[in-house]
Amino acid sequence: MEAGAIILLLFALHGTASASSFYGGSISFRAPKEKAGTYQVTLHHRQNGRGSCSDKPSFQCDGGVCTSLDSSEVLLTDQDSMGQDRWCQSEAHTTATLSTNHSSLSLRDSGCCWASNVEGKTNWTSSVELDLGTRSDTQEVNSCPVTTTVSSLRFPQNCFTRVRLLAHDPDGDKVRCRFTKDATVPQNFTLDETTCTLMSSGQVGVNVHVFELMLEDFPTKNITLTYADGTTVTREVSNVNQPSLCKVKLQFTVEILSPIPNCELGHVQPMFLSATPSHDDVLYATVGQTFQIYAQAQANHASIKDFQVSGPRNITKVVKEENFGKASMTLRWTPLQSDVYRFIPVCFTAETNETQSEMRCVVVMVTQATIIQGKASVQCLPNKMTVVLEKASMPGIDENFLELKDSSCSLTSNSTHIMGTMSFSTCGTKIEDKGDFIIFQNEINSFELPTEVIVRRKTVKIGFSCQFPKTISISSYFSLHKSDYIFTESNFGSFGYTFEIFRDGNFSNKVPAKAYPVEVKLLQTIYMGIQAQSELSNVQVFVESCKATPDDNPDNSLSYNLIQNGCNKDETLKVYRSDDPTSFKFEVQAFKFTGNYDQVYITCSVILCEIGSPFSRCAQGCLKEPSRRRKRAVGKETVGHSITQGPLRFVSQAVPEVAVDEDDVMIMNDVMPDVMIKSNTADVMMESYTPAEVFPPTLLRKAEPGEEGGSIREILNTNISTIFFATAFLVSLVVMAVVIRHFSIKRRADDRKSLLVSGW
């Protein structure tokens, strides 16, 4: 009996431990199916927690409208592989069957217990409400917002800024996020309801916080809902009090950790790189074919141990550590026939022992057959992009039913191609910060007319983008060629700069990106050029400052000014005149910073001005007294934008090998000591010189046969001469020391005499 009691106690303790590990959950839907006078609605429920995450959902139909509820087995989709059991996630699906004479469906699940949290939450409830009317715009039952989160979100206290939540609606409806009515909102957290972004309004408290949100969708145009009994309801956009079409509850936790010394992305907090899909991307998978997602992150001062993933059942994950603090993840999943037309949320984070990256989320749409992607070529300019599609790659496509994200922007075509040109701030172009790059994205999609009941046109989705490297702070061993920079201002539109290093003073042969870091020798002339590009024709570029730093941080306290307030500060800097007002070309002699530094980055602040404006910064030129600078001419000039190029890496010149005859004696085996010279405020280190560079060649060669006199080398070839010169050298040192001491004693005597005289 005692043994039985102990076993029961162990089971009870295990149940308590398992129950107290709830970290949240999310719900997503398959499209409802009508069958023999009934609706079959299948929902997928993901549960987050610690340990096994094996609790089976037990949804109940509100109002008893369901004739049956069937739940699948629970499958683990992700768990902590770092050996600390920080998270796990499982997914199961439940199919509700109900009569078509019902106008809505409401499902609810509940359990215990939330992980220990600041808000004191214990019991939890998941819920969803769906309107079952057929929409007039899609001729289908409404699709609910698609959302999820990874199991465990955690941020250092001083680094928390925001959490972007996934809120995608398959019908294109407007999604609103709000805290549930019974939620306890954690202190100093706020929610942007339109973008579904969780933010801070002050310092957030260290510990685990619980969040319970409701996602609701509202149509963006007037629609009519038709029910099985023939009744209809009109939903007008102008009615701000109209009920939502669907309500989905999202629950998650955010753990606030102790502060860390540096919040810069890519330092300790992992930063996603450009190979990673953008947040909110819609990706496409095909039934029976392996679908793949690749993500890459970097943390220069921490080790990325794992990637946390929220994904569908049977998804697999492969994590690979790479050089320079990088790690990558590959997700693979093969959709089944039952997954067709599902919109599946996938979220992921890169994990270190100290913290994690931002959460990225995408939506995967499963199709029966591969969507036609088309063959596109994209030309990327500093302020716009042009896409050209081959019609031959899209057989059977009606070009009259293709549009950009912003349908007000038109496409043009000829007999072989479809073309579109857009600036980076128009036509629905999306700007994405992807860590090491800025990405400008747009897409061409097929569309349907609101009056069409059926269509036989193929679905088209062609995404295209331009990416440009951005200036980021990275460790010195990871060097980037920084060239293209894009900026946008209201009066100047989108404009850009290229900053290049050239091989010579013709400025026509630039150093290619693959050649970076650029290896140079000290005192070598470096040719650099800045080119502004704008759609406006009457602009000119002005370089207000250029400074050098030993790394790619332009705010480094160790710096050296080449140009300051528009004035040349380095004596070797030469600016070339140019007939092109948008071009700035200059040369400077290479130098290095004293100390253990072998690289130099150049950062310039550039301004674009309207030509002919007498009050612009460009017209003022060099200002030796910055305080006299006039107020910025609004609309006539841009603000100063920083652009960086480098690194320049310094290499020592190799010592040339000298052929030595058997009778020859090598004068010097090592190079001469480094020579220091001073240039303004920067110490400049000259290169090491070989003997051949210090002594004239005629003094180092052997005398030719029959030549009168001998060279120094001939003299040095005799032992007697060597002893003679060595003795003379020592004697000269002694004489020099005596002379110096004599003058030193005489000076001290003169100083004492002057002090005595002045004292009287």
Image (cartoon, grey):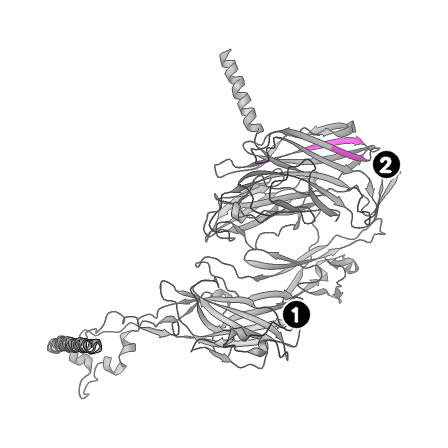
Residue 457 is at least partly visible in this image: yes
Task: Kindly report which numbered mark, 2 or 1, lies closer to the viewer in this rendering.
Answer: 1
Work out whether mark 2 precedes mark 1 in sequence or the reverse, and give the earlier one.
2
Q: Is residue 273 left or right of residue 524?
A: right
The amino acid pointed to by label 2 is Ala
Provide the secondary structure element on which disc 1 rests: loop
Of 479 and 620, the residue lying toward us: 620
Residue 249's spot in the image, x, y percent?
69, 38
Q: Main secondary structure of the magenta part?
A: strand
Residue 412's spot in the image, x, y percent?
75, 66
The residue segment tinted magenta is 88-106
How crowded is the residue under tag 1: few (<14 C-alpha within 10 Å), some, or many (20+)?
some
Of 350 and 575, the residue lying toward us: 575
Residue 191's spot in the image, x, y percent?
65, 46
Q: Extreme right residue here?
A: 230
From what the image shows, is residue 661 above or below residue 642?
below
Task: Say how many tags the image has.
Answer: 2
Residue 443 in magenta stretch: no
Q: Extreme bottom residue here?
A: 708
Q: Is residue 397 left or right of residue 542?
A: right
Which residue bears the numbered disc 1? 492
Q: Extreme front residue here?
A: 760
The amino acid pointed to by label 1 is Phe
Provide the secondary structure element on which disc 2 rests: loop
Of 85 and 40, the residue lying toward us: 85
Q: Residue at x 48, y 74 (%)?
A: 563
From what the image shows, is residue 84 above or below residue 553?
above
State the CA–CA distance, disc 2 to disc 1: 56 Å
Which residue bears the numbered disc 2? 228
Residue 165 is at least partly visible in this image: no
Q: Residue at x 65, y 51 (%)?
A: 281
Residue 103 in magenta stretch: yes
